[in-house]
Amino acid sequence: MKRIALLGGVLALALAGCGLVSSPPITNPFGLEGQQTSINLGPSSAATGNLNVTATFNDTTLNLPVTPTGFNYNLAISGVSLSGSSCPSPLPASVNVSMNLSLTVSDNPSSGPRQASATANNVQFTLNQSGSSYTVANFSATLSFSNLQTLLDILQNGGQNDATLSGTVNTTSNPDLAGCTLTITWGGGQGILRF
């Protein structure tokens, strides 16, 4: 029995060294849950717009058994709506959406400001009409932070933190959505530490 336990421990450390072990998900690590972004879609061959939302969040305690090798953030959307007097009537039954996203996390401790960032490009998903609103289908946006140690320092110490999510949005539908306001309610998403 001791041999099996020892072998399991050695195997876990070996996998951790390869980056194949990940932490349990950290829910809503950047305080985005419930934040809203309203995007005014302008006229173009695909109605386009810019998004920007900022959230504040507190430090957290991470019990790290070994030094992590990466941090991925799986962004989430909890709701979407379309509005505006210039929106087509009736609204399209489905809308194809493409986004380029950037997330910057920062704080300003006494030692000076610091920030970490991650991007996700060409994130594609579909909005399907459901009554007077839309449901989100096939949304998957994983943002990977390259400056890991700075991110860990921001998350664990230095006081209140800020997260800014920004990007561009393209929509394709028939009829198109030029003149509409697309409002996205963000979910908290999940952060995953890799070891």
Image (cartoon, helix red, strand yellow):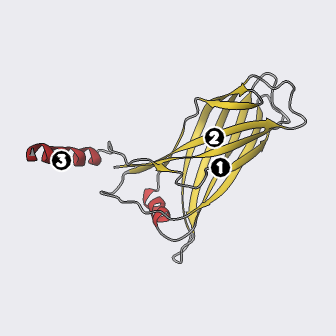
56 to 40, vertically: above or below: below
Q: Which mark is residue 75?
A: none
Residue 191, given in percent of the width and then of the height, sits at 48, 49
- The three-letter amino acid code for the residue at tag 1 is Gly
- The three-letter amino acid code for the residue at tag 3 is Val
Query: Quick one: SS at disc 2?
Result: strand
| Labels 2 and 1 touching (C-beta < 8 A) | yes
**Inter-mark Cα distance, 3 to 1:** 42 Å
The reply, left or right, for residue 107 in relation to residue 97 is left
Q: Which mark is residue 34?
A: 1
The reply, left or right, for residue 129 in relation to residue 19 is right
Q: Which mark is residue 78?
A: 2
For disc 3, the marked residue is 10
Residue 91, given in percent of the width and then of the height, sits at 81, 26
Residue 76 seen in the current view: yes
| Camera-nearest label, 2 or 3 | 2
